[in-house]
Image (tube, rainbow, N blue to C red):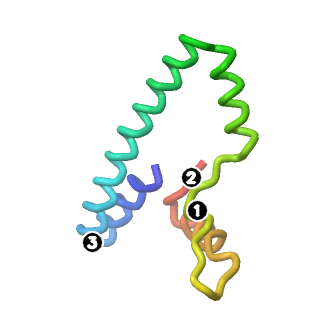
């Protein structure tokens, strides 16, 4: 969703390259989502108890985006600031 929203904002503001790159990434992410959904569905079908335990373990560990590790050498809260801006302009939405 974030990459698709970034593509839309890029187009709205005349940045066709940003829109194009973000659109490509959004398409790739959609394919990943589809693959993970199919894999998880099959695992739930083959071993529901094992998959539920694995899923619980993963969710309790709290999935974090790799970007939360970004650091510019100055701002210890860089990702939070980045995320706040993304939320404010509509890239990240609930």
Label drawn at residue 14? 3
Using the rendered view, name the quadrant where residue 47 is placed. Answer: top right
Mark 3 and mark 2 in contact? Answer it, CB < 8 Å. Answer: no
Q: Position of residue 90 (x, y in %)?
A: 51, 60
Q: Considering only order in the chain, which callout, 1 or 3, is on the residue closer to the N terminus?
A: 3
Q: Position of residue 86 (x, y in %)?
A: 54, 65
Q: Position of residue 71 (x, y in %)?
A: 60, 77
Using the rendered view, name the quadrant where residue 59 is placed. Answer: top right
* Label 3 SS: loop
Toward the top, the furthest residue is 46
Q: CA distance from mark 3 to mark 2?
A: 22 Å
Q: Residues within 10 Å of mark 1 (few under 14, many from 20)?
A: some
Q: CA distance from mark 3 to mark 1?
A: 21 Å
Q: Please give the count of numbered marks on the rendered protein.
A: 3
Q: Which residue is mark 1?
A: 87
Using the rendered view, name the quadrant where residue 52 is placed. Answer: top right
Mark 3 and mark 1 in contact? Answer it, CB < 8 Å. Answer: no
Which residue is drawn at the image coordinates 33% and 46% (left, top)? 28
Position of 13 with respect to 83 (left or right) is left
């Amino acid at each position: 969703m974030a990459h698709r929203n970034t593509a839309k904002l890029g187009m709205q503001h005349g940045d066709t390259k940003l829109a194009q790159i973000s659109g490509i990434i959004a398409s790739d992410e959609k394919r990943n989502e589809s693959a993970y959904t199919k894999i998880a569905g099959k695992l739930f079908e083959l071993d529901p108890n094992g998959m539920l335990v694995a899923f619980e373990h993963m969710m309790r560990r709290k999935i974090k985006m790799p970007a939360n590790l970004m650091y510019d050498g100055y701002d210890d809260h860089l990702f939070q600031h980045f995320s706040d801006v993304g939320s404010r302009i509509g890239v990240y939405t609930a």
